[in-house]
Amino acid sequence: MMRSSPNIPEGAERVFEAESLFHAQTLVAVLADHDIEALAAPHIQHGTGVHPDAATGPIPVITRAADAAEARAILADVAANAQHIDWDSEIEHEAAAPQMRTGGMPLVARLGLIAGLLILGLIFIGMILTIVL
């Protein structure tokens, strides 16, 4: 069960400075998986008291002071494990995935468009001839 307090800021301690709000919220989720309540707190950094929609870093990640040491240890462990991921290999794998076709509209769609435009043109010509004659 997660150790929680209704509003962390009383007795809160910064455990990490994230690069963005997304990064901070990801770290909050990691800590929640380890039963530590944390908060991405951009309003503390920006001094507004308001949670901006698209805050830019650094964004403090805060926890209760009693959980701070454990939270730092968990985040350090996660960072160490992430160092072992071969990101270049993942990128090359994605690059080898089949690419979407970019040659324009398929032939059937082109023929349908041409037929539709011809029908609209004939209707328009018919309306004009009805008015003129």
Image (cartoon, grey):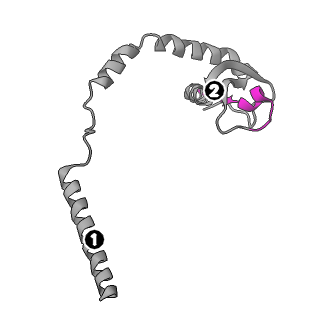
Query: Considering only order in the chain, which callout, 1 or 2, is on the residue closer to the N terminus?
Result: 2
Boundaries of the magenta span: 35-50
**Disc number placed over residue 121 in the picture, else none:** 1
User: Which residue is identified by label 2?
Assistant: 36
Q: Residue furthest front?
A: 132
Q: Which residue is drawn at 55% across and 26% down?
A: 30
Disc 2 marks a residue whose amino acid type is Ile
Query: Which sits in the foreground, 107 or 81?
Result: 107
* Quarter in which the C terminus is drawn: bottom left
> Residue 40 in the image: x percent, y percent?
67, 30
> Residue 8 in the image: x percent, y percent?
75, 31
Q: Which residue is drawn at 28% across and 76% down?
A: 125
> Residue 42 in the image: x percent, y percent?
71, 30
Query: Which sits in the foreground, 44 or 37?
Result: 44
**Neighbours of disc 1 within 10 Å: few (<14), some (14-19), many (20+):** few
Q: Which residue lies furthest to the bottom in this view?
A: 133
Q: What element carries label 2?
A: loop
